[in-house]
Amino acid sequence: MIKINSQELYDKINACWIGKNIGGTIGAPYEGKREILNVSGFASEPGKPLPNDDLDLQLVWLKALYEQGPKNINSKVLGEYWLSYIGPCWNEYGICKANMQDGFLPPMSGSVLNEDWKHSNGAWIRTEVWACCFPAMPETAIKMAFEDASVDHGFGEGTFAAIFIAAMESVAFVNSNIDELLDIGLSKIPEDCRVSRSVRLVMDCYKKGMDWKDTRNAVVKDSEDLGWFQAPANVAFVVLGLLYGGCDFKKSMLYAVNCGDDTDCTAATVGALLGIMYGNKGIPDDWRAYIGDEIQSICIRQEVSRYPKTCTQLTDLIIRILPVTLNSFIDFRPVYEKRHTLNQIMLTDDKTDLSELDINKWKGCGFASGLAECSPYSITSECMFADATVELDSEPFIQPFATISGKITVRHNIKTGDQMHLNVKWFLPDGFSVDCTKNLLMNFRTGKTQSSICKFTITAGETVQANNDILIQIKCPNRPTSMFLPLHIMG
């Protein structure tokens, strides 16, 4: 059990958003600069922060948490909120919206026709809301960050970046050791992904005593094949700022900004993370006074709904929902069992007590270990007794008389010992056919999640429409609930 003082937590959450606002304002005027910079402070007028989409989208996600509840948040729900409340259509924002409007559900909305932007910065810059709503709960925070990131990045590097940053931010509420935070963040993503490679490059250069400019240039060179505005290099610039700046607020933020590239994102993330680590006492008074408390919006459709207008209001809303979020994913086992895998969080008026905190429990890839092997063209459906995923072997495009193949994986959800027969039924466009088994058997082994896999091949007919919708029904004969997997294929 981790006991966190309520006022201390309030201060850290508030400092997260103040730090986010400061960094976004300092970095925004230089966004996209490719050279090493020499920024030393604000270039904007005092009294108002500059608008920042990195923060805007998180206000919409908080709205979703309030209206849907934490257990109901997934990429499909967030995709619907995106279409309803978020206006801009630039880069991956526009691609994912166009894909969803065309019929592709997340995470396919972040994969289809998105080679230029699936590795970019749109998602890791909006992870603070998940960390603040799930402090010291990194496994939950990264799952939420994944659901968020997959809407516009699929299974690209942009999604791994979001998992890495969300893990660090969630743990930072109870640990301010930057080396341990980096170790935990890296343990949550595949070791061979590009985000991990870039972060480890910075860490290695820093340990060797290299000048920060040389380290920055090494990152740029290593990421040449990906280009600018991509997550691996920009996340590395955040880490560079934290290490070379010694986690001092001003120094760290300016190091990150002066690396160039997506400067508002790197500076804002440095500010948010340091705000969580040290609270408002770690933010310089002159910079906090220069920005103030206001939130300036740039991409929320304000005519649709109201949102918090200040960092104080935003903090209050998060504090209000914490009793729900902190208890939404508690491991349901008898209290006398000693097999708990996650620390439980209790808010208290007493002093913060971390004596039972075992930081090593948070190290390990776990959740994200299989993402690199997943097809980017997949859809998952969940129900009470099982989850099902359909994965395509190639992009979701088809020509007359051509084929497209894939597999369906069904995973047992209820460890009751029941063996399950599952019926698979396809609803296809006119002229289409499918070669696939119609029955699956789900065996059960105590203590293990069981899965059953069937492969399929879809063959198009003579006529292929621009948009072709396929529905797969999976039903257990002795259960009233069916799973439906909507599969969209373009002609």
Image (cartoon, rainbow, N blue to C red):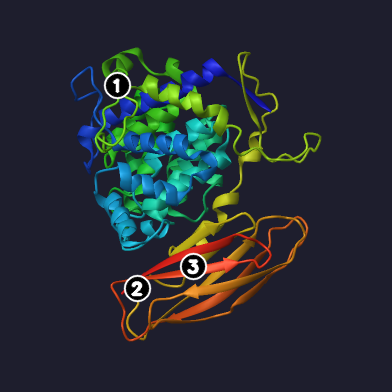
Element type where label 2 sits in the image: loop
Q: Position of residue 159 (x, y in %)?
A: 43, 50
Q: Which mark is residue 397?
A: 2
Q: CA distance from mark 1 to mark 3?
A: 44 Å
Q: Which residue position holds label 3?
A: 391
Q: Few, some or many C-alpha atoms within 10 Å of disc 3 (few <14, some 14-19, many ≥20)?
A: many
Q: Few, some or many C-alpha atoms within 10 Å of disc 2 (few <14, some 14-19, many ≥20)?
A: some
Q: Disc count in the image?
A: 3
What's the residue type where badge 1 is placed? Glu
Name the one closer to the observer, 218 or 196: 196
Q: Position of residue 439 (x, y in %)?
A: 63, 76
Q: Please give the name of the residue rendered at 51% of the width and 57% of the height, measured from the top-left corner.
A: 371
Q: Is residue 191 left or right of residue 363?
A: left
Element type where label 3 sits in the image: strand
What's the residue type where badge 2 is placed? Phe
Q: CA distance from mark 3 to mark 2?
A: 14 Å
Q: Which residue position holds label 1?
A: 294
Earlier sequence position, callout 1 versus callout 3: 1
Q: Is residue 458 left or right of residue 297?
A: right
- Give the residue at the far front of this rendering: 480
